[in-house]
Amino acid sequence: MIPILDLTRQHKQLEPELERAIRGVLEGGAFINGRNVAAFEEELAGYLGAAHAVGLNSGTDALHLALRALDIGPGDEVITTPFTFVATTEAIGMVGATPVFADIDPETLNIDPRAIAAAITPRTRAILPVHLYGLPAAMDEIVAIAREHSLAVIEDCAQSIGATIGGTRTGTIGTVAAFSFFPSKNLGACGDAGAVVTNDEQLAERVRRLRAHGAAVKYYHDELGVNSRLDELQAAILRVKLPYLDGWIERRRTIAAWYTVELGRLRGITLPVGRPRQAVRHVYHQFTVRVADRDRVARDLRERGVGTMIYYPVPLHLQGVHAGLRLGEGSFPNAEAAAREVLSLPMFPELRDTEVDRVVSSVERVLAPQSALV
Ligand SMILES: Cc1ncc(COP(=O)(O)O)c(C=O)c1O
């Protein structure tokens, strides 16, 4: 079976370095707020070209605490995409605010700036774009809309670390950004981990306080916070991996180019957008195609030994958790169509050339005859 992702290959390659880093933490005896957390925060900020990075327990907490730091709460609306992982809107709910969905652009599968403009009300406080699958959202337009209406922009960079627009990294374009280092992400820890990134010193300080029980000085609690610190072991692991990230992204992009050339010759399949409007660097957290009879294609690929995944089968406005918003089928047709058709193919830097070849030939077979070579 060719897996959609196999983390053991990466960890095998890095075994000596990871073991040394983990042993260093165990021997150092500091597990919370140690030197690895501080160093990783600095290295991450340096990599991204941002002023501040604050290590946290998860990407979900990063979104949650970014919203808290912006004082967004009950009565406020945050505009976001219905086609994302639930954590995006979960965080909005956690602060008591209301998610307002804007449909996606069917070409990029990211939030459509025109739909954002139409969703603004006097209660809107922020726009929360997600750089889905590692493809940057239309930030030029989003930032312009936010400026015009005095809104914050919170970038959900869980899937987009390293992606750029005109050379600028995602996560440094909006007001504040949330990163996830969930193990399967392009930069993954060996457990849960995340970070808030911002150029705004006050926001960074506020998140630092919120992550540590609302205390800027230990045992002096200024406000209600949470316990959401990045731990030393995860920080040490992330420090080992960060220098490899750009090389891994290049390998992802090579595999994506290969898929694009080979699968681009087939009918009945839509590939990830190849010529986005802005000069963007897609980091292919996922290589996600669209096919009309998606479930059959997934089943046939599985029978041929190719693993696939569906990110995501149900758009958020149709999930039970958001039933209270009373948004029925047909509310966001582009997101609904995407949820019916998307299929992610194996994509990780350690995928072997022979495996990429086999994925390609399997997709060719499974799509035939309706997709006879053009
Ligand atoms: C788009 C998106 N947002 C937020 C998250 C939440 O990150 P975490 O799992 O680290 O809490 C994830 C990933 O899980 C994600 O894919």
Image (cartoon, helix red, strand yellow):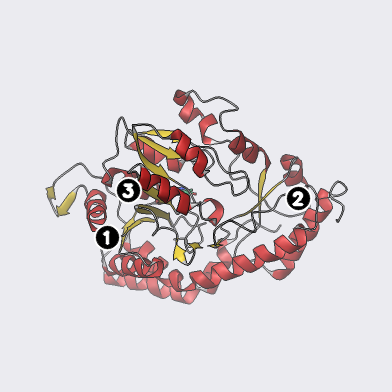
In this rendering, which labeled residue sits more in front, label 2 or label 3? 3
Mark 1: which amino acid?
Answer: Ile
In terms of sequence position, does the residue under pointer 1 or pointer 3 come before the other? 1
Residue pictured at 44% horizontal, 43% vertical: 88
Q: What amino acid type should be assigned to the residue bearing mark 3?
A: Ala
Residue 355 lies, in percent from the top left, at 72, 65
Seen from the viewer's position, the closer of residues 263 and 4 is 263
Q: CA distance from mark 2 to mark 3?
A: 40 Å
Residue that label 1 marks: 32
Please state the horizontal and vertical placement of residue 22, each as a whole percent of the image: 38, 69
Residue 350 showing in the rendered view: no
Q: Kindly report which numbered mark, 1 or 3, lies closer to the viewer in this rendering.
A: 3
Q: Is residue 119 above or below residue 284?
A: above
- Quarter holding the C terminus is bottom right
* Secondary-structure class at tag 2: helix
Marks 1/3: CA–CA distance = 21 Å
Task: Please give the residue where the numbered disc 2 appears in the rendered image.
Answer: 301
Residue 343, horizontal then vertical, whole percent: 67, 47
Residue 10 visible here: yes
Q: Is residue 94 left or right of residue 312?
A: left
Mark with earlier residue (2, 3): 3
The residue singled out by tag 3 in the image is: 66
Q: Looking at the picture, does residue 30 appear above or below residue 94?
A: below
Which of 37 and 123 lies nearest the eye of the viewer?
Answer: 123
Mark pair 1, 2: CA separation: 45 Å
